[in-house]
Amino acid sequence: MVRKLPPYVVKEYTRHGKLIYYFRKDKGCRIRLPYPNEPNFMPAYLSALSGVPIEQGYIKPQKKEPQTLRWLVSQYRKSSHWASLAFNSRKRLDLYFDQVIKKSGNVDYKKITSKHILLGIEARKTTPASATQFLASMRALFKWACKQEYIAINPCLSVENPRYKSDGFKAWTKEDMVHFQNYWQEGTMPRLAFEFLLYTGLRCSDACRAGRQHLKGNVFSIRTQKVGTIITVELPDSLMRLLERTSTGKETFIVNRDKENMDAHQFSLWFTHKSRQAGVHKSAHGVRKLSATLSAEAGATTHELMAGYGWKTVSQAEVYTKGADRIRLGINSSRLVASSLNSEPNKKGAELIAKKTVKSNA
């Protein structure tokens, strides 16, 4: 009795009259097989049928990828996207990834829904800033996972940012500026740091890296670490003179007392300490806010602020332009009321109000 061949197995005779067997499914390529009566025929046939390579007479089982959240985070940390992030961004994400892995590392990431993300936010309701950063870390992870087709639906898409009232870092005022300048005289490193932050509006992560390599004449240009945009500003003569009068570092303008460069965290702590010595209990980022506020109140447009401060979205710049517009419109409105009742509006009073309106707008 003739033995029936398995599906997709065909036999042919070569031009030399030799009988051979092939596996061919539909219009796919032909795969040579042993004779059906040989012991290695069936393993070879199953290998061709499944597309899995055969090793040592048996089909090597497919390795199933783990589906835990711990594994997904580990893959993200190996990705090119992760490598492209700034050091401080990776450090911040790592903090929240470690928290999540410690509590839910063995959870199947494919079963995570928006409800689980919301529960994570709710668990951090007493620390709103932490809740916001937790959501940001999950968004980064699952956005990448969705692009890599590890998941079909991003569980963070429908989750809104936690709402809480906070102005963030307190902005410096003009009074703070005067206190600081009176305490730290020209020629000191804290004074240079303050003036440099004020006139450039840089973040700590960029101010600590700034050096003469970024200067051409009095034009300063640097690629920001956080966003990656290039900021180009013109330094005033007063700041250029201050750079000459101050003993700066070889690679960076701002150095510690040992003439060593500082990273962003060290610079931030150092500047906060110097500010407190001057009686100003605020941070370096508050100087950036003062700089943006002064620029907006002087008439800078939204796009000018975006270019000067390295913002990518209009909404960030509008925080300052809208605040400045409210001041101007409020003064104009009060003048209209005064002019409708009096022949001579109180211009002096309005000017005094305008001088006291440097407030936090972020």
Image: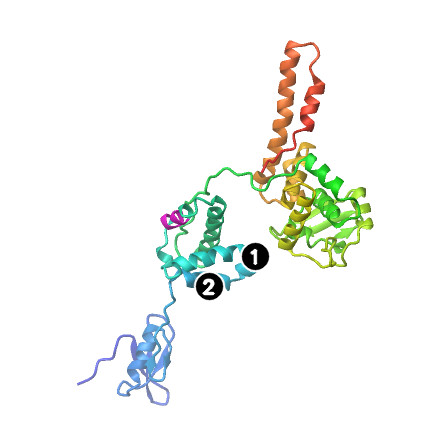
**Residue 155's x, y, as percent?**
40, 50
What is the magenta segment's predominant secondary structure? Answer: helix
Please tell me which residue lies in front, 121 or 191.
191
- Quarter of the picture containing the C terminus is top right
Upstream in sequence: badge 1 or badge 2: 2
- The foreground one among 275 and 200 is 275
- Residue type at the position of mark 2: Ser
Residue occupying the point 73% across, 56% down: 257
Residue located beneath label 2 in the image: 74
Q: Residues within 10 Å of mark 2 (few under 14, many from 20)?
A: few
Residue bounds of the magenta highlight: 115-120
x and y percentages locating residue 127 in the rendered image: 47, 45
Task: Quadrant for the N terminus, please.
Answer: bottom left
Residue 9 point in image, percent of width and height: 29, 78
SS for dot 1: loop
Residue 280 sits in quarter: top right
Q: Residue flagged by tag 1: what amino acid is it?
A: Leu
The residue identified by callout 1 is 85
Say which element carries label 2: helix
Q: Is residue 178 magenta?
A: no
* Rendered image quadrant of residue 346: top right
